[in-house]
Image (cartoon, grey):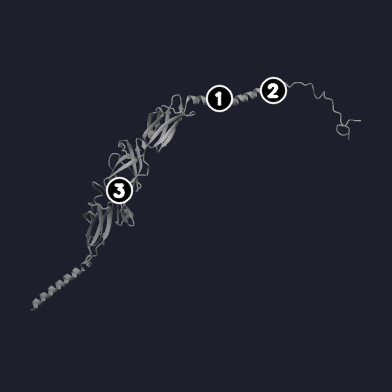
Amino acid sequence: MNRRSARRHLVSLLALLAALLLAAAGPAVHGHATAGTTRPQAGAPPVTVTFRTVPAVPGVRLEFAGTTLVTGTDGTASYTGAHTAAPQSLRLLDTSVDTPDARYRFTRWAGQRDPDQTFRTRVDGLPLRADYTVTAGFTAQYPVTVSFADQHGAPLDPSLVSSVKVRGSDARTSDLSATGTTWLNGIVPVFRDSRLTPVPVDYTLRSLVYDGAEIADAGRQSFRPGPDRHLTLTGTFHDLTVTAHDALFGYATGQKATVTGPGGKTYTASLGPDHTAVLTHLPRGPYTVDVDASGGATSPRTIQLSQNVTADVTVIGLADMLVLGGAALLLVGLPIAIRMGLRRRARRTAADPVPDTGTTEENVPPRRPEPSGSPPGAAAG
């Protein structure tokens, strides 16, 4: 090798060495990466962030670190990226998802680190330094339809139902449609032990107003919504028998019964030959019963119809009035007559003088005193 060739090799070696030194000194020359940059740290393993829906909702779209994700059939999606100190943003693109069997409505996050962003659809400042999970909680609603029957299973006319109210274990009161579909909360996400748990919602029937009457036995009927749920809600009905009897003599009487029920609805019925009328299948509740009796007065009765009941109305007839009137005259007039007789006797006594017997104190001779020492009754010697 000649001298010129050796010099060229030496220059090439020095140039390569200088390039290596410049590459190694590059960070020192340009400064350290600041927060907010996306420069990955050399040699750090990739980071996976898992997104989960509770309950599991497929087809939910999310955007994380500029990438759109979609949850699968198990309600999860994941993102894997290079380790970085730069904060990331998460945005829920679908806050509601509707299917034929259920409706899902976003409620809250868990695992998003910042409690002030728990109920927002966008979460900022998420790290990408280690694996972790973020959970999106959804409230699941299910369709509910209803029909109505009495306690014996006989169907009721839904057009006469004016109000149906149910109360859930989540302390919410809801109105049910008597003829259509009502979507009720069936599952709600509850934050327990630092995680979201899907909790079913149970309901009880609180009110069922039928033909103006409250026929529900509040709290006795319960159910849990689910896909394609149909309910049969039960109300109670009873029979009311109306009779009427004379107040004093006890014989049956009356021609017509008038019954006023809940909501002011009025029922009328003729009393038969036995002076009895039966009103069947009346909704439970308070009733006022009155009877029309010729020539008599009645005292209406108030009853609570919670089972089959016989209401006996008291009638005060003409004979009763005569007897009661005579008794009243006797009770009132006898004391008055006695007092008047006593007064007349007193006046007569005061008006008549005492008879003169002719004897006065002035005509009676004085009594002679007895001698001292003589026995009583002894004559003087």
Could you say where residue 274 lies in the image, as x and y percent from the top left? 41, 28
Whether residue 188 sits left or right of residue 285 in the image: it is left
Q: Secondary structure at mark 2?
A: helix
Circle number at residue 329: 1
Q: Quadrant of residue 366?
A: top right
Could you say where residue 378 lies in the image, as x and y percent from the top left? 88, 32
Question: Pointer 3: what residue?
Answer: 186
**93 to 156, vertically: above or below:** below
Q: Quadrant of residue 19?
A: bottom left
* Dot 2 or dot 3, earlier in sequence: 3
Of 203 and 295, which appears nearest the observer? 295
Q: Secondary structure at mark 3?
A: strand
The residue carrying pointer 3 sits among few (fewer than 14), some (14 to 19) or many (20 or more) residues within 10 Å by Cα, namely many
Question: Pointer 2: what residue?
Answer: 350
Of tags 1 and 3, the one toward the viewer is 1
The residue carrying pointer 2 sits among few (fewer than 14), some (14 to 19) or many (20 or more) residues within 10 Å by Cα, namely few
Asked if the residues shown at circle 2 and circle 1 are in contact, with their CB atoms under 8 angstroms apart, the answer is no
